[in-house]
Amino acid sequence: MKKGLVLICSACFMVGVLVGSANADGGISAKIGTLGYGAEVTVGIAPALNLRGGFNMINFDEDFNEDDDGSGNSQEINLEVDFQTYGLLLDLHPSRGSGFRISGGMMINNNEINMSADLNEKVEINDRDYYVTGLKGNISFDQLAPYAGIGYGNAVGKDGRWHFSCDFGVLVQGSPKISLQATASNPFLQERLNEDIAEEVDKLEKDAEDYKYWPVIALGVSYKF
């Protein structure tokens, strides 16, 4: 989080310096997409090249109460999706008068998913059944993630002050990193439970290796100042 804020502050400072001292054009944008909602600042650093810095975020936090068999043994489950990305990108406009752009850069990726549950029934972990008093899980990704994509729109374009934009790209977030913790109802089974959790996590991470790429689709509107 702190690294992301440093990145954005640095980008904003760079925009201010370039706009103020080099008489460069600047723009601000609001956007929404698969990384959540966010904002960006853009500065033109060459006739066909822009620098773009911004952030995206979305948070979903929900509690579920499940009683599938009607026995009254309910499960309290909490799911939290917390996406935060901070990016610094270069936009190349091959045709100076066109909004089409090719983009690339780096993002600080703080996206993660957390789950916790208070259970009143047995669960299966690594093909063994356990009674546990609590279960917690986390999925995270590489914090430094390259981005590449294409899009349309130029926040510092010459054709007016308001512009529409869209992006289509890929965030290389790395293979998901999974952690799982559980407390056995029977303390004497805790050591074996920990071993089974480690094996289960290893299996899950191997199954999730193909999900190292996050598709990025975003729409936005910008204002040139």
Image: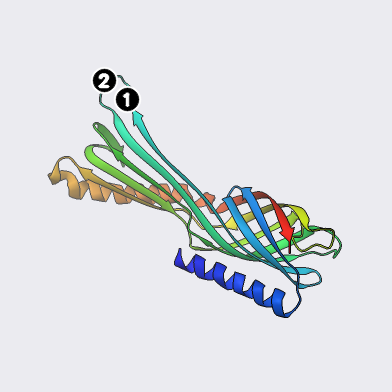
Q: Position of residue 77 (x, y in %)?
A: 34, 37
Residue type pointed to by label 1:
Asp
x and y percent of residue 195 in the render? 25, 50
- Residue 13 position, x and y percent, is 60, 74
Query: Is label 1 in a helix, a strand or a loop?
Result: loop
Check whether the beta carbons of the residues at disc 2 and disc 1 lie within 8 A of each other: yes
Secondary structure type for disc 2: loop
Instruction: Residue at 30%, 32% (x, y): give it.
Output: 75
Query: At 56% across and 67% down in the image, what residue appears?
Result: 8
Query: Is 92 placed above or below 129 here?
Result: below
The Cα atoms of the two marked residues, 2 and 1, are separated by 7 Å
In the image, 146: left or right of 128? Answer: right
Left or right of 172, for residue 68: left
State the residue in front, 144 or 156.
Answer: 156
What amino acid type should be assigned to the residue bearing mark 2? Ser
User: Which colour scheme appears in the figure?
Assistant: rainbow
Residue under label 2: 71
Nearest to the observer: residue 187 or residue 15: 15
Looking at the picture, how far across and down is residue 204, in whole percent?
41, 47
Rendered position, 27 above or below 19: above
How many callouts does the rendering have? Answer: 2
Residue at the left extreme? 188
User: What residue is shown with label 1?
Assistant: 67
Residue name at image x 75 percent, y 73 percent: 24
Residue 155: name its quadrant.
Answer: bottom right
Relative side of 157 to 53, left or right: right
